[in-house]
Image (cartoon, rainbow, N blue to C red):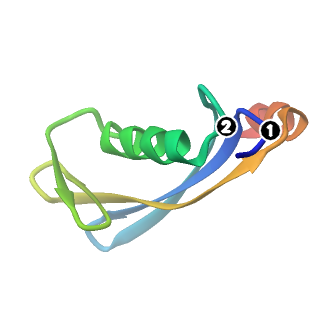
Amino acid sequence: MNNTNYIFLRLEERNGEYEYTHRCTLKIPDSQTETVEKFVKNYAKGFYGSKVEQEDDGYFFNNGEVFVRIREWEFISEGHFNILNRYL
């Protein structure tokens, strides 16, 4: 268990021939790794807010045209959250 309720999340998106990395900071309900895993999965699953199809390591949107998966996440301090949140 960590002692912070903030994370830095990176998602990968494939959209046809294009690939993107999305970065965001999130405040989470508690600092248990199990909670964070569930939280980021739900975040990725709702990334485009449309009908989603789950595959082994990610989610397809728009009838399979867009694929989003969790690249990685890490705990960050409240100070880092406040700084990053200003720029992301």
Dot 1 surroundings within 10 Å: few (below 14), some, or many (20 or more)? Answer: few
Note whether 5 is above or below 38 in the view shown: above
Q: Nearer the viewer, residue 25 or 64?
A: 25
Instruction: Report which residue position mark 1 lands on.
Output: 3
The residue lying at 14 percent from left, 39 percent from top is 51
The answer to which of marks 1 and 2 sits earlier in the sequence is 1
Q: Residue furthest left?
A: 63
Left or right side of 73 for 53: left
Instruction: Report which residue position mark 2 lands on.
Output: 31
- The image quarter containing residue 28 is top right
Q: Amino acid at mark 2?
A: Ser
| Image location of residue 2, percent across then percent down | 75, 45
Q: Amino acid at mark 1?
A: Asn
Left or right side of 22 for 18: left
Q: Residue furthest front?
A: 1
- The image quarter containing residue 25 is top right
| Image location of residue 80, percent across then percent down | 86, 41
Left or right side of 1 for 70: left
Left or right side of 41 for 45: left
Dot 2 surroundings within 10 Å: few (below 14), some, or many (20 or more)? Answer: some
Note whether 12 is above or below 36 in the view shown: below
Note whether 15 is above or below 33 in the view shown: below
Mark 1 and mark 2: Cα distance apart in space: 6 Å
Q: Quick one: SS at disc 1? A: loop
| Image location of residue 73, percent across then percent down | 61, 55
Which mark, by number, is residue 42?
Answer: none
Q: Nearer the viewer, residue 6 or 14?
A: 6
The residue lying at 47 percent from left, 38 percent from top is 39
Q: Quick one: SS at disc 2? A: loop
